[in-house]
Image (cartoon, rainbow, N blue to C red):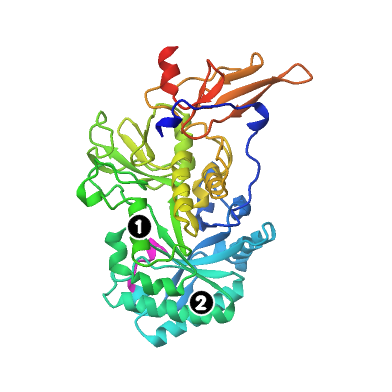
């Protein structure tokens, strides 16, 4: 990287127009999970089917349905079905295919809250597996989905039995045979880290029967830990404890590939949310600082220990956060008082997407679309998901991410009442980008918020995006 440190990137107005709608990569798969319960969130966090931009995904996954015996259980009939003045969510979701030709819609079963016990019982005999598979096919056919995503968390764990590993393979094999007859897609969400995946999955065998394997490469650290930790670090850090050295994205992908998962089926999961902690000592706010449980709940997700990206960027806009980008782990974290958040932003998501390109994996998965800044309150709509698309398509991601690119140590600024008083390029007080001020034919100033590529900051002295912001900060 040293040879690039003196590089200067010039930006002209015509090359800096805000991002327009993009199409999901034709070469890579982009799985977008949708938490249907997000419709119950308050105010700007409320997310409904029509808020999904289907052009940003190749596969959309509706979550969740549950398991009851060997039957598919609809967990929220009022939201999912048309009966009794319901919201008819399944139909509305599947009709998104009309807006984006080639889009596939999936139904997911399971999730963390479902546990493992009932899945273990269902998979334990040939008869119960067959009944289950028949019920799944009837469900998919009735409601018009293209496929099924199994999210059993996890075989041989959380109430399961050791035989689950073999029974899981048998279940997938039998699903595959039936799905081939019906022309249906079969995928599964699986644990990413070796410490969990090795207990649950016979990887060479399950890989034979799945179209796609979605590794959930997040939740490596969370509020149950006694110290702060990053939700989804890209790489290991020299400061990581021995037990943590495999709890990162690169190590998880390496494990699955080494165990026999075909790269053309392996999909890397990315979190559009952060994990939060409450610090014991506010002055000690680095990675690994002592913590005493989850951070405060956000206004939309309302769950201690978790903040959606839209909650994070809006909170940053209110000011007061110390924001640090950890270059080793290639992820940001932030702290304010006794609150600490390890999360992902445009830069770190771009790094994960680049890993997909470098290893030629099948594609990306995000959990979940309703966590992104889908309203564009902080800048560009869907900045994280659009970044995934841009990198996988070989384009430079330049979404308008106004509140997550603050250089650590820089004081926060208060925007003036009018940022455009004359024509030219001026620093944006809320980001490392800049404001382009242009006078229209009526003599009024028009303001355009522009962003530099990830890692660059606007240099007001030379009017360019600069690789080394410290040089001009210190010299001014």
Secondary-structure class at tag 1: helix
Do residues under tags 1 and 2 come within 8 Å of each other at their CB atoms?
Answer: no
Classify residue 184 as left or right of residue 166. Answer: right
Query: Was residue 116 drawn as part of the magenta stretch in this picture?
Result: yes
| Residue at image mark 1 | 254
Q: Earlier in the sequence, mark 1 or mark 2?
A: 2
Say which residue appears at 32% left-offset and 58% top-offset: 193
The mark closer to the camera, 1 or 2, is 1
Write down the quadrant of residue 68 in the picture: bottom left
Q: CA distance from mark 1 to mark 2?
A: 33 Å
Task: Pick out the residue farthest to the bottom.
Answer: 127
Magenta-tinted stretch? 111-117
Above-or-below relation of 141 to 80: below
Residue 191: image location, x then y, percent: 36, 61
**Which secondary structure, mark 2?**
helix
Q: Quarter holding the N terminus?
A: top left
Q: Residues within 10 Å of mark 1 (few under 14, many from 20)?
A: some
- Above or below for 460 versus 218: above
- Please say whether residue 143 is one of the residues in the magenta stretch: no
Residue 254 percent location from the top left of the image: 35, 57
Please name the residue shown 41% across and 21% down the image.
Answer: 470
Taking the image as drawn, is residue 158 in sight? Answer: no
In this figure, which residue is indicated by the disc labeled 2?
A: 136
Q: Residues within 10 Å of mark 2 (few under 14, many from 20)?
A: many
Q: Quadrant of the C terminus?
A: top left
**Residue at the left extreme?**
242
> Going 45% across and 41% down the picture, which residue do you hit?
299
Residue closest to the far front: 3
108 to 439, vertically: above or below: below
In the displayed structure image, the side of residue 205 where residue 460 appears, left or right: right
Residue 155 placement (x, y as % from top left): 33, 70
């Amino acid at each position: 990287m040293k040879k690039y440190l003196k590089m200067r990137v010039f930006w002209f107005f015509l090359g800096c127009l805000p991002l327009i709608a993009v199409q999901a990569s034709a070469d890579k798969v982009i799985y977008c999970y949708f938490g249907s319960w997000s419709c119950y969130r308050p105010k700007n966090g409320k997310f409904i089917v029509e808020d999904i931009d289907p052009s940003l995904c190749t596969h959309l996954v509706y979550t969740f349905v549950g398991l009851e015996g060997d039957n598919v259980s609809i967990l929220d009939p009022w939201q999912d079905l048309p009966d009794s003045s319901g919201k008819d969510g399944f139909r509305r979701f599947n009709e998104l295919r009309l807006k984006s030709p080639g889009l596939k819609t999936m139904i997911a079963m399971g999730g963390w809250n479902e546990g493992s016990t009932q899945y273990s019982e269902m998979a334990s005999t040939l008869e119960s597996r067959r009944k289950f598979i028949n019920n799944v096919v009837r469900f998919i056919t009735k409601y018009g989905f293209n496929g099924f995503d199994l999210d059993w968390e996890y075989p041989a764990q959380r109430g399961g039995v050791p035989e689950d590993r073999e029974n899981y393979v048998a279940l997938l094999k039998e699903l595959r045979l039936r799905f081939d007859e019906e022309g249906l897609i079969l995928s599964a969400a699986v644990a990413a880290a070796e410490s969990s995946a090795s207990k649950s999955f016979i990887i060479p065998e399950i890989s034979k029967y799945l179209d796609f394997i979605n590794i959930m490469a997040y939740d490596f650290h969370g509020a149950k830990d006694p110290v702060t930790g990053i939700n989804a670090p890209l790489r290991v850090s020299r400061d990581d404890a021995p037990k943590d050295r495999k709890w990162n994205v690169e190590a998880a992908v390496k494990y699955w590939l080494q165990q026999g998962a075909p790269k053309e089926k392996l999909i890397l999961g990315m979190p559009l949310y952060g994990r939060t902690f409450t610090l014991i000592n506010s002055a000690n706010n680095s990675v690994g600082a002592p913590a005493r449980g989850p951070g405060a709940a956000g206004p939309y997700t309302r769950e201690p220990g978790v903040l959606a990206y839209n909650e994070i960027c809006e909170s940053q806009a209110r000011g007061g956060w110390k924001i640090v980008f950890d270059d080793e782990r290639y992820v940001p974290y932030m702290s304010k008082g006794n609150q600490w958040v390890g999360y992902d932003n445009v830069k770190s998501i771009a790094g994960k997407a680049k890993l997909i390109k470098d290893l030629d994996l099948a594609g990306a998965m995000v959990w979940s679309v309703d966590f992104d800044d889908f309203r564009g309150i902080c800048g560009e709509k869907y900045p994280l998901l659009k970044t995934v698309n841009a990198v996988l398509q070989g384009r430079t991601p330049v979404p308008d991410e106004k509140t997550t690119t603050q250089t650590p140590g820089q004081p926060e600024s208060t925007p003036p009442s009018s940022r455009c008083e004359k024509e030219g390029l001026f620093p944006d007080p809320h980001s490392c980008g800049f404001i382009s001020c242009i006078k229209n034919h009526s003599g009024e100033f028009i303001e355009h918020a522009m962003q530099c590529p990830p890692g660059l900051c606007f240099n007001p002295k030379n009017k360019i995006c600069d690789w080394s912001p410290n040089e001009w900060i210190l010299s001014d």
